[in-house]
Amino acid sequence: MCLALPMKLVERREFDGTAELNGVRRNVSLLLVPEAVLGDHVLVHAGSAITVVDAEEARKTLELIDSALRSEP
Amino acid sequence: MKFLSEYRDPQRVESLVRRIHEVTTRPWTLMEVCGGQTHSIVRYGLDRMLPAQIELVHGPGCPVCVTPLEMLDAAHRIAARPEVIFATFGDMLRVPGSETDLYGVKARGGDVRIVYSPTDAVELARKHPDRQVVFFAVGFETTAPANAMAVKVAHDAGLGNFSLLVSHVLVPPAIEAVCSAPHNRVQGFLAAGHVCTVMGYVEEYPGLATRFGVPIVVTGFEPVDVLHGVLLCVQQLESGRCEVENQYSRMVRPAGNPVAIATLREVFDVVDRAWRGIGVIPGSGFALCAEFAAYDALRRFEVAHRPVAEPAECIAGLVLQGVKKPGECPAFGTRCTPEKPLGAPMVSSEGACAAYHAYRREPAEAGS
């Protein structure tokens, strides 16, 4: 039930918007993420965006994992 | 699929598995709290890639599984009323109560409808002013804010025909219950990522980590996330640390989502809740606060509390506490299947039994 997916916000209205993943579009409530702007990725759970994806943190996590890979003996 | 496919990359999976093998010198037992993580682990076979010393036990993070039988019975009785449209996530339809399930209620004429969000349920109330629309609010902290918001929206729109049947549960008290159990074997936790997206991890988790001497790593759901969480947790255990760490920083801020938390505080009170198969855990759930009590379906339909006994053969309680694996149940895959379940973990999309069944873990292997 805690399943949630990152979707790209392609339309922004006052309280809701349209988000897209793999060409599938759906209406999502933005009441819990007033800071979300067009083009953001939002984490969508049961029809509500519950956070805006932090792209910088995403990059850092992958870099950390990949640097561990490179430094292996 | 941005922010998804990078975390399913086979090379990253391989390198993380190698790292975990390198750092592991002793046996460790970890619990992944969330049923979504359990499904990821079993689906991708992540547990089979780990060193033999590392055991993953499956946690109680399946809201459908821990919804008490009494609450399911109450749902079935409310859903059977002629004036009611009973709106629910699809997960709940096949969960057995003591007499029937929601499919059974629907088959006998109950108006049961699957919705994808609580907003859909509010829309139903708007479209059918002559009917009572009841939304079954099941779930952890991830799900609760949108449900709280739905109550506020209904309240502001003057929709007196909308109500919630609330059965919300909270993760930190469940971690405390697992750690306090006399038979506990869990030495470290992969905390449920999306629960922490809402609640953050600075409020309650540091106290639990210190008090029980367990590392807690906030972890995501994709294979790379889960393995990264395991690596961080094992590194802590191997070096004798018990801290709260955040593997899932792209989705989780330390203090969570402030708007969601404020909405929860406005609409809900923290209350004691009974967990199916586990029992009452103090301060482990939400109920509507006094201001919104009029939207409480239990109160509106005056459903009496009727205690009922669990099916004797079902070991769901032990599975949910990580004491037993699904394959250790004598009924697994024979007298208990997703089509005819004895307990909720066999039907929920987050249930451990359903994961073992769907991905064909044979009983002998599943129990090992």
Image: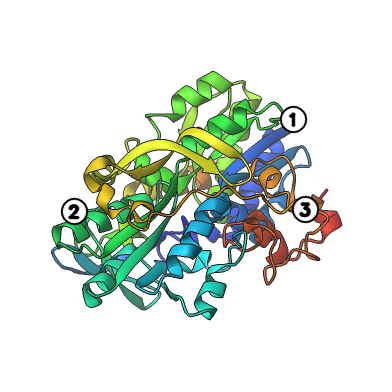
Residue B58 visible (yes or no): yes
State whether discs 2 and 3 lie on one chain. no
Q: What is the distance, in whole Å, between disc 2 and disc 3 at their CAs?
A: 49 Å
Label ID, residue A34:
2
Residue B149 in the image: x percent, y percent?
25, 54
Q: Quadrant of the C terminus of chain A?
A: top right
**Callout 1 amino acid:** Thr
Which residue is nearer to you in this view: B32 or B61?
B61
Above-or-below relation of B103 to B63: below
Quarter of the image for residue B29 reads top right
- Is disc 3 surrounded by few (<14), some (14 to 19) or many (20+) residues within 10 Å? few
Mark positioned earlier in the residue sequence (3 or 1): 1
Which residue is nearer to you in this view: A37 or B143?
B143
**Callout 2 amino acid:** Pro
Could you tell me which chain the residue with mark 1 belongs to?
B
Could you tell me which chain the residue with mark 2 belongs to?
A
Closer to the observer: label 2 or label 3?
3
Above-or-below relation of B332 to A73: below
Image check: B308 left or right of B158? right
Residue under pointer 3: B313
Please, what secondary structure does the residue beneath circle 3 have?
loop
